[in-house]
Image (cartoon, helix red, strand yellow):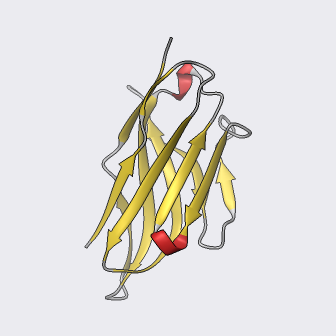
Amino acid sequence: QVQLVESGGGLVQPGGSLRLSCAASGRIYRINDMAWYRQAPGKQRELVALITYGGSTNYADSVKGRFTISRDNAKNTVYLQMNSLKPEDTAVYYCNANVRSLSASTRDYWGQGTQVTVSS
């Protein structure tokens, strides 16, 4: 089994910054893609940013130039640096990881979510 634990959410004023972290643990052989999704009230969950094992990244248009995704493969951890935050960034942010386990099976895992609120 694999667990993803997120941290770093909170309340921030517009224009401020937050850094989210997500650490994976368990019977991990290798983590392929890692990603951050978010879900605002009344809306569908959407992809915010994705990073491959090799470090290639992809971002939603709404966050390009403001958010940066990175990872530390040695620590099985993914980060999301969020700058110039806007009220419309308010959502629950979820970590996602595509994990190949020690049993050789591969599947997606999700974190429990962390609330980000951007408000004055």
The residue under the point 31% across, 79% down is 27
Q: From what the image shows, is residue 103 above or below residue 22? A: below
Percent position (x, y) of residue 67? 64, 41
Percent position (x, y) of residue 94? 41, 47
The extreme top residue here reads 120
Is 60 placed left or right of 100 in the picture?
right
Q: From what the image shows, is residue 119 above or below residue 29? A: above
For the N terminus, give its image quadrant. bottom left
Percent position (x, y) of residue 71? 57, 62
Is 10 placed left or right of 17 in the picture?
left
Q: From what the image shows, is residue 26 above or below residue 114? A: below
The residue under the point 43% across, 55% down is 22
Q: From what the image shows, is residue 3 above or below residue 117? A: below
Is 74 placed left or right of 102 in the picture?
right
The extreme right residue here reads 65
* Foreground pick, 107 / 7: 7
Percent position (x, y) of residue 51? 60, 61
Q: How many numbered marks are there?
A: 0
The extreme left residue here reads 1
The residue under the point 30% across, 48% down is 112
The residue under the point 65% across, 37% down is 63
**Occupied quadrant, residue 101:** bottom left
